């Protein structure tokens, strides 16, 4: 994916920057971008280590089993490939719970742990497996119960009712998640047929 | 409001508390296990870093060169046809690629059009219901060094489009119902 998108983004930007005479800003953008990556990575490093460590503890206790039992039916539908792989199912459960609770800082490390376990079972290491695709789609759908960041912004801007956003966000998130998972399922089926 | 604030503040401490409490009750060597897991976190971060440098430079260029604004200008007449609010367009375009930029734009929209105006509500709903899709895909795929990503981008972007369209429709219905 990035092999084609990445150079196109950059080449078009440079071309447009030259044509529109935005050269100074264009030059700064290179270093700003690289600097942004460092900033994000340092933030990620801490939370990734923290949550990988906490997840390791959780995995060794019955806590994770309790949580994954609760959302097992949903996982069975979305990840039929996994069948009874308990470890991966538990990691996905933790990732989904973190997403639902709005713990973005925890959800990403937990999701990355789940996908690295999936990679160990993956037959073709060069290609995303069906369950990996489902995991990523779920994580791009932003399944959170309370959109805390937006509520905070709204309240800082003096909204009369900052939390009135919750209901529309639920509707939109659920629609996005349904469209995402269904189109992933359909695309999985189509590509499978082609291979045969 | 107060209760929701409390709920979102208690979520993380409570989970950590429960994990550690289970570990103690079940007599695990908690800190040793923690260290093992945490060092795995370093490996994952190092794997992701080069991807992030590449991606963020590209995104920064898209914005710095003014190309994003140019695209917005081209697309907006099209959007008028499907009745998608033009004011939201920069947000809709940037949302999948940059988290920080989209927060900045959404805040700006809410400020300019009013937090509780229909446009302000739509911007907030889009922020709450979608993710930084390309960034998410990039870190997940680069952490396991996968080359073929199949159709993941299509599925994820379809979800984003559906979420944005739903945001517009629901917010319009809400504002109409209130006034």
Image: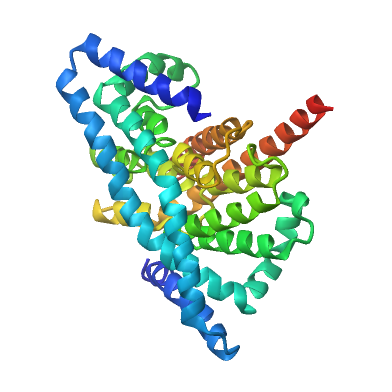
- In the image, residue A131 above or below residue B172: below
Which residue is located at x 58 percent, y 39 percent?
A: B146
Q: Position of residue B136 (x, y in %)?
A: 48, 43
**Among all residues in the image, which is located at the extreme top?**
A19
Give the camera-side residue of B17 and A181. Answer: B17
Q: Position of residue B31 (x, y in %)?
A: 46, 80
Q: Is residue A28 left or right of residue A42?
A: left
Report the residue at 32% width, 43% height from top.
A37
Taking the image as drawn, is residue A64 in sight? yes
- Give the total number of marks visible in the rendering: 0
Is residue A42 shown above or below A130? below
Q: Quadrant of residue B141?
A: top right
- Toward the left, the furthest residue is A24
Displayed quadrant of residue A65: bottom right
Give the quadrant of the C terminus of chain B. top left
Q: Is residue B51 left or right of residue B137?
A: left
Q: Which is more toward the observer, A192 or B109? A: A192
> What residue is drawn where x is 63% and y is 42%?
A133
């Amino acid at each position: 994916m990035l092999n084609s998108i990445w150079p196109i983004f950059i080449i078009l930007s440079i071309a447009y920057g030259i044509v529109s005479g935005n050269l100074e800003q264009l030059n700064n953008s290179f270093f700003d971008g690289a600097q942004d990556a460092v900033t994000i990575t340092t933030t990620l490093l801490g939370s990734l280590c923290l949550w990988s460590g906490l997840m390791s503890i959780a995995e060794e206790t019955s806590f994770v089993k309790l949580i994954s039992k609760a959302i097992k039916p949903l996982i069975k539908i979305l990840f039929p490939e996994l069948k009874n792989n308990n470890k991966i199912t538990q990691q996905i459960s933790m990732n989904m719970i973190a997403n639902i609770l709005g713990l973005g800082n925890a959800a990403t490390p937990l999701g990355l742990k789940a996908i690295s376990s999936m990679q160990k079972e993956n037959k073709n290491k060069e290609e995303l497996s069906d369950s990996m695709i489902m995991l990523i789609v779920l994580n791009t759908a932003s399944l959170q119960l309370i959109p805390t960041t937006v509520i905070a912004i709204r309240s800082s801007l003096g909204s009369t009712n900052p939390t009135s956003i919750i209901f529309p966000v639920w509707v939109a998130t659920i629609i996005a998640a349904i469209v995402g998972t269904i189109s992933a399922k359909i695309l999985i089926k189509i590509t499978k047929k082609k291979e045969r | 409001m107060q209760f929701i604030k409390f709920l979102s503040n208690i979520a993380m401490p409570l989970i950590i508390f429960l994990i550690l409490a289970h570990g103690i009750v079940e007599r695990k060597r908690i800190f040793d296990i923690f260290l093992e897991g945490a060092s795995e976190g370093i490996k994952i971060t190092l794997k992701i870093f080069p991807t992030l440098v590449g991606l963020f430079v590209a995104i920064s260029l898209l914005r710095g060169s003014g190309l994003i604004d140019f695209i917005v200008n081209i697309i907006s007449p099209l959007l008028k046809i499907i009745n998608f609010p033009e004011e939201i367009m920069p947000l809709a375009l940037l949302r999948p690629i940059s988290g920080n930029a989209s927060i900045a734009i959404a805040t700006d929209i809410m400020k300019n059009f009013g937090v509780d105006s229909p446009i302000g509500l739509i911007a907030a709903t889009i922020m709450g219901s979608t993710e930084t899709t390309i960034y998410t895909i990039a870190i997940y795929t680069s952490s396991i060094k996968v080359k073929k990503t199949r159709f993941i981008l299509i599925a994820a972007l379809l979800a984003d489009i559906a979420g944005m369209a739903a945001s517009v429709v629901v917010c319009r219905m809400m504002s109409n119902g209130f006034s």
